[in-house]
Every structure is written in structure tokens, then in C-alpha cells.
Amino acid sequence: MRPKTLRLSGLMLVVLLASGCLTSGPENHTLLQEGENQTTTHTKFPEQPEIQKTPNETYENPEYLKLYFVNESCYLEGEFFLNEHFIKKTANTILTLYWEDVAGYVNKSGEDVICLKGYLPPCFSEYAGWNFKGCWYINLSETYFVGIDVNASADINPRDPIYPFEMLNFVKPAQVKSYIEHWRDILVFNNDTEHDLEVIWNYVNTIFQYRDDMLVMGVADYWRTPNETIDSWGDCEDWTNTFVSLALAYNSSLKCYSVLLPEHLTTFCKFPKDDNSYEYDFFDKDTNPHRVISKFDSDKENKLRELLEWYSSDYGAYGDITAVFNDKQYFEFENNDGFIKWALYSV
């Protein structure tokens, strides 16, 4: 994984990219956000120097900390989280905190993780309205709350998402709806979900060309939207997000998701069968779909586990599934056990 550098009050912090087809990285750090099953990977950062107290007696209340989240000259708005707890929203690009706002959520035995999650402002031009999320390490303590203003500088690249919340930007069924309508006339759809998804899978593989981002764009990761990928080129995340977009354009009620593995992205779909069973499928480029049908019996967990092992071994995509996402929602997991329980009981 390639580190991205963020800064808080002149202190360097590093977060780790969790995307791309071939990645590797150091020790994981787990961050659980309120209302989410969230696993986020960061690099461990050395102990930070303490900020010097600089109280100003002219402040009406010098016991605050004001945070400004900025990407170059673009100020960001959003929801602020400390560790796993939602604290408050920014107001006019300013987050004003008092020690009592955060004292109960500070990690007293180690570093804290602060995050801002929201939508990119108009100064991001064509990416305005896209999801963004930025996280920083900080040893937060009462010494910060002395009437100071702090810039939290972010290096947000919409084409190189770190977090699944940002990856939602690249599943866009509306962009490929016209392709599905056109293909209904030229492909053999028969309103059977298993059959029709396989028809879409086969056709996409005939028109998609795999190209490595570094060779074409000169960067390790450059995520493309479905309308940029279809009939063109891309790598694993581009194929996966395009296929999921097509599946949802075909039937918006389908439970289809892009699946994030340590070194790969693939597609997972779950849908009911006529006999009250469920079908679970993994779709990937140039590899026949891996599927299992499981009725409501005691063996369904083993069947899904065997399916995942079969897919991983056959495709060579090893490691635990860390997240799934589509255009509307995402879920994150600590390991494959979490994914399996979600797939069986929550989706």
C-alpha cells in the first residue's frame, strides 16, 4: 500500500491506501465508526511532540480548539468523528471543539484518530458532491484547548480513494443504464437473474481491455467511472465497479457489491431462487462465475465458506475481505468470518 501524507498543525501523519489490484502494507489499525462496521488501515506513526500552550487572554473563552480542514485552498465540510464516536458537524468550514465535547472519547492510553466525512465542495470542480473521508492521528489532550486555530491539511485525490465511503463514487448504475436497454435488444435476456447476469458478464469481458494504471496513466492507482471504462480499458477495480453498475442497472433491487480484498477487487451477488434457496455468486474478469446455492439449513455457512475458498484459490486472490460497497451503501469487516455472517444474515 502506498502511504498518503496528511498534516495536522505542522505534524506529519500518514494513512495507508486500501485499494488497488496489488497492494501490501504494515500493521493494521482498526477504527470503528458510529453506526458502521468499519475497519480502516493506517500506518503506525511515532509519538508526536506536544503542542505548546499559547493562551491568548483576549479570547472570550480561550478553552476551545478550532479546526479547519483544508485541501490546498479548498475548505471541507462534514461530520467529525473522534475514534469511533460522532462528535459534531462543521459549521461554515469551522469545527469548534471544547474539551467537554471530546473528553469522554479520548484514548487515554495512546493515539487518537480523528476523521472528517462529507461531500466535496464546488471548488473540486467536476468532483463536487463526491464522497470524501480524511483521517488523522493525534494524541489529543486538554493542552490543545487553549484558544488556538489549527489547519488539518488533507491531500484528497478523488481518483485514488482510500476509504470505502469514497469508493461509492465509482459505482454508478445511471451511467450504464442505456447499455442495458440497448443490450436487451441484442443479447439473450430471459428474466432469469442467474442467466442474465452471466450474459452481462460474458459480454463485458468481450469489450473490456485490461490495462495497468501505471503503464497508461503513470500513477499506481487511477479509478475510472463506469462510462469511462465500458467499451474501453481499466484494471480490476474498474472492471468490478462497472460490472456492479451494470448489474444494478439491470435490476436495482439486486444485492450486488464490489468486494475489497488485500490485493484485488471482485464482485459478489446474492439473490433468491424459486425454491426458497439463495444463490451466492462471485463474478470476476475472465474467470467463470463461482456460485453456490444454499437453502435454509445448517450447512449454509460452510457452503459459503467453501465458495469463498474456491474462488480465492482459483483466482489467486487471497486474504480476508475487508469491505463491500455499491452505489448506496458499504460495510466493512475485520475478516472473512464477518463477511460470511453479513452475507448470510444481513443482506
Image (cartoon, rainbow, N blue to C red):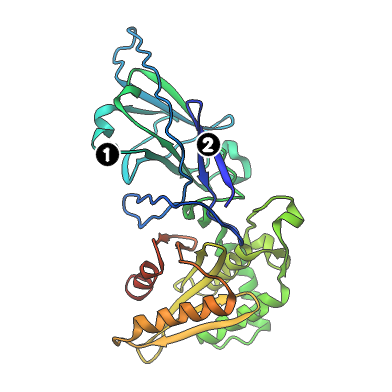
Q: Give the farthest residue toward the bottom.
A: 275
Height in image: 22 above or below 160? below
Residue drawn at x 50%, y 51% as measured from the top left: 26
Residue holding disc 1:
105
Residue 142: name its quadrant.
Answer: top left
Residue 34 in picture, x, y percent from top left: 32, 50
Residue drawn at x 37%, y 33% as measured from the top left: 139
- The reply to whether residue 153 is in sight is no
Say which element carries label 2: strand
In the image, what residue type sits under mark 2? Leu
Say which element carries label 1: helix
Height in image: 206 above or below 27? below
Quick one: label 2, few (<14), some, or many (20+) residues within 10 Å? many
Residue 254 in picture, x, y percent from top left: 46, 74
Q: Give the farthest residue toward the right.
A: 216
Tag of residue 6: 2
Quick one: label 1, few (<14), some, or many (20+) residues within 10 Å? some
